[in-house]
Amino acid sequence: MLAVLRISYNLFYYACGRDAAIRGRFCMKKALKIVVIVLALGFVILQFFRIDKVNPPINAADTLEAAVEVPPDIQIILGRSCNDCHSNTTIYPWYANIQPSAWYVKDHIDDGRRHLNFSIFNTYPLSKKQKKLSELCEQVRSEEMPLPAYLWIHRDAKMRPGDAEALCSWTNTAIAALEKASSN
């Protein structure tokens, strides 16, 4: 914070000189003009620091579909509301080309994949699979997922009436199927 104040003071002093109080308004306009130019240049320079938008490869044997049966209606819900952040099939939106918003998007995608990744779901131990499916139901029911910030721009990702119940019913069936398969 002290550094910002020092830079601001130095910028003001550079723009206005010692007799800033005498020049008044002219001095402030000049300082504001310099600040706008510096911010614009900073924004342009940020555009050279791009995110990596290449999705990791998908091995069909590692996916959610390889672990449990996923009915078509559930695939549609997951594809519409979950896959952009929770799989390796992310379709990056237009604003992922503009820094610093792209960093924010990439961070959310990486975080989502860290918590639950449908593309590597079958690599999880049985207890983790069951826990993740249970959490999926809880978070959809409580409207924690999809994230409200994601829904601001992706309105089509919002859960429709009955989607949460369909997902929860399916997760319960999938958990039971996983238990049955492990006991055999």
Image (spheres, rainbow, N blue to C red):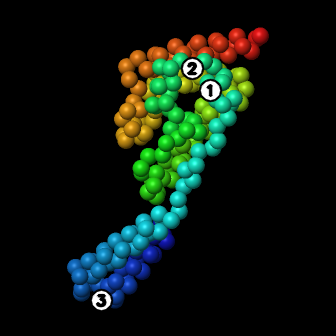
Q: Residue furthest bottom?
A: 18
Residue of label 1? 64
- Residue 70 circle label: 2
- The percent position of residue 92, horizontal first and vertical second, equals 48, 46
Q: What's the residue at 51%, 24% (across, down)?
A: 75
Above/below status of 27 relative to 104: below
**Residue 140 image offset from top left, x and y in percent:** 48, 25
Q: Please determine whether, in this image, residue 99 is positioned above or below residue 66.
A: below
Q: Quadrant of the C terminus?
A: top right
Near mark 1 (Cα within 10 A), the count class, few <14, some 14-19 or many ≥20, is: some
Is residue 138 visible to the viewer in this orientation of the structure?
A: no
Name the side, left or right, on which 19 lies relative to 120. Answer: left
**Looking at the image, is mark 3 or mark 2 earlier in the sequence?**
3
Amino acid type assigned to the residue bearing label 3 in the image: Asp
Which amino acid lies under the numbered mark 2 shown in the image of this protein? Answer: Val
The amino acid sitting under disc 1 is Leu
At 64% across and 37% down in the image, what residue appears?
58
Query: Dot 3 corresponds to which residue?
Result: 19
* Rendered residue at 46%/16% (across/down): 165
